């Protein structure tokens, strides 16, 4: 499990590498190159978490559903619904 703290929009990007099959869909889906590829491990790497724009394309693209993009939402907003 990777755990990456990010900047403005997103608190962290989690990828459960134990469930990852190495299909590269997340890397291809991320248009701002936050997710890159590690040829050695043949698994995705969250290389530039600070550039994440919370589009959730990587989450949607992952057939194994092992990616979780956690938004940086203030607690009052989260509890108001
Ligand atoms: S949420 Fe969007 S910008 Fe962020 S890592 Fe996933 S695909 Fe890239
Ligand atoms: S889309 Fe999911 S299964 Fe495919 S490489 Fe990315 S994390 Fe692994």
Image (cartoon, rainbow, N blue to C red):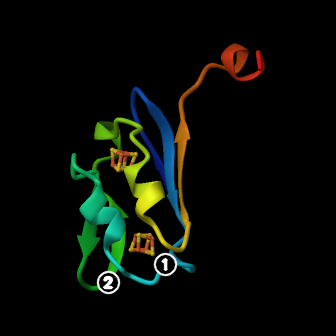
Left or right of 58? Residue 68 is right
Q: Residues within 10 Å of mark 1 (few under 14, many from 20)?
A: some
Disc 2 is placed on an element classified as loop
Count every numbered label the image shows and give the total: 2
Based on the displayed image, in which of its 4 quarters is residue 66 positioned? bottom right
Question: Against 24, is 42 above or below?
Answer: below
State the residue at coordinates (28%, 48%): 48
Residue position for label 1: 20
Q: Is mark 1 within 8 Å of ligand 2?
A: yes
Residue 43 shows in the view: yes
- Residue 56: x and y in percent read 44, 46
**Quadrant of the image containing the N terminus:** bottom right
- Residue 31: x and y in percent read 22, 49
Cα separation between marks 1 and 2: 10 Å
Label 1 or label 2, whichever comes before in sequence order:
1
State the residue at coordinates (34%, 35%): 53
- Residue 33: x and y in percent read 22, 52
Question: Against 24, is 61 above or below?
Answer: above
**Disc number at residue 52?**
none
- Between 25 and 71, the one lying in front of the other is 25
Residue position for label 2: 42
**Quadrant of the image containing the C terminus:** top right
- Between 51 and 66, the one lying in front of the other is 66
Question: Against 52, is 60 above or below?
Answer: below
Disc 1 is placed on an element classified as loop
Based on the displayed image, in which of its 4 quarters is residue 73 positioned? top right
State the residue at coordinates (50%, 44%): 12
Q: Residues within 10 Å of mark 2 (few under 14, many from 20)?
A: few
């Amino acid at each position: 499990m990777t755990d990456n703290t990010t900047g403005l929009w997103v608190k962290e990007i989690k990828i459960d590498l134990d469930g990852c099959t190495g299909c590269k869909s997340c890397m291809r889906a991320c248009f701002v190159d936050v997710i890159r590829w590690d040829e050695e491990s043949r698994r995705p790497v969250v290389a530039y978490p600070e550039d994440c724009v919370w589009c959730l394309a990587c989450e949607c693209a992952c057939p194994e559903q092992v990616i979780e993009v956690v938004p940086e939402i203030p607690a009052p907003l989260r509890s108001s619904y």
